[in-house]
Image (cartoon, helix red, strand yellow):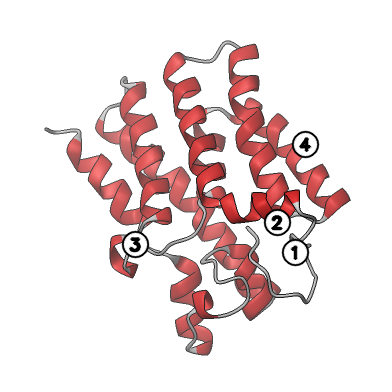
Amino acid sequence: MFYIIPIVSSYLLGSLIFSLIVGKLLKGVDVRSHGSGNAGATNTLRVLGIGPAILVLALDIGKGVLAVWLGKWFAPDLLWVHVVCGISVIIGHNWPVFFRFRGGKGIATTIGMVATLSFLPGLMAGIIAILSIIITRYVSLGSLLFTGLLPIFLVIMHYPVELIFASILLFIFAVWRHRKNIEKLLHGQENRLGAKKREETQ
């Protein structure tokens, strides 16, 4: 029962959707009602500009880092607690209790979790994902590549099974949250980063 404290705390931390908080504080808008309708850093960029987007991205990544450290503080020697806390903060971001369970897609928060628990595999997957975004300007494609390649690198580099199973779950989350983007990618209709067309992206 003791370990429920950091796990639940991580979910509540994830439920703080900073794109919505920043949007309300700076412009009095709900970013979910504009642009792609997604409560994430990419849509914040579209709706509020680069400064607020960078702030939201940093805060969302920070949530993932802090959640893992909550698990480490409460259970220093139990990797599964660290992993579950990381998953919980992402679930909170995707389905936040404070915002009627309408959150973002969890990629920035996933980056924070992965960077804390498995930096090198995350870095390798991240480099490929960033290159794909630079080349194609599809943020959704980069997000899917990042989460899809992560389990492969974890297996190749012999990381603990807890992290491998968690990374597979994170990929499932990403596919589910990007299901509309996947359909648009397949039909050549996905919005590119920086484009004016208002379609749903990462």
Give the Cα separation between the discs numbered 2 and 3. Answer: 24 Å
Q: Nearer the viewer, mark 3 or mark 4?
A: 3
Instruction: List the residue tagged with mark 1.
Output: 191
Q: Nearer the viewer, mark 2 or mark 1?
A: 2
Most distant residue in the front direction: 187
Give the Cα separation between the discs numbered 2 and 1. Answer: 8 Å
Task: Point out the tag, 2 or 3, that comes first from the N-terminus.
Answer: 3
Q: Position of residue 67 (x, y in %)?
A: 38, 44
Quarter holding the N terminus is top left
Instruction: List the residue tagged with mark 2.
Output: 184
Label 3 with label 1: CB-CB less than 8 Å? no
* Secondary structure under the numbered disc 4 in the rendered image: helix
Labelled disc at residue 128 = 4
Instruction: List the residue tagged with mark 3.
Output: 101
* Secondary structure under the numbered disc 3 in the rendered image: loop
Q: Nearer the viewer, mark 2 or mark 4?
A: 2
Badge 3 amino acid: Phe
Q: Which residue sits at x=66%, y=52%?
A: 183
Task: Point out the tag, 2 or 1, that comes first from the N-terminus.
Answer: 2
Label 2 with label 1: CB-CB less than 8 Å? yes
Residue 139, by quadrant, is bottom right
Quarter holding the C terminus is bottom right
> In the depicted view, which residue is nearer to us: 90 or 69?
90
Give the Cα separation between the discs numbered 3 and 1. Answer: 25 Å
Direction from residue 73 to residue 23 in the image, left or right: right
Work out whether 117 lies above or below 37: above
Q: Position of residue 95 (x, y in %)?
A: 37, 56
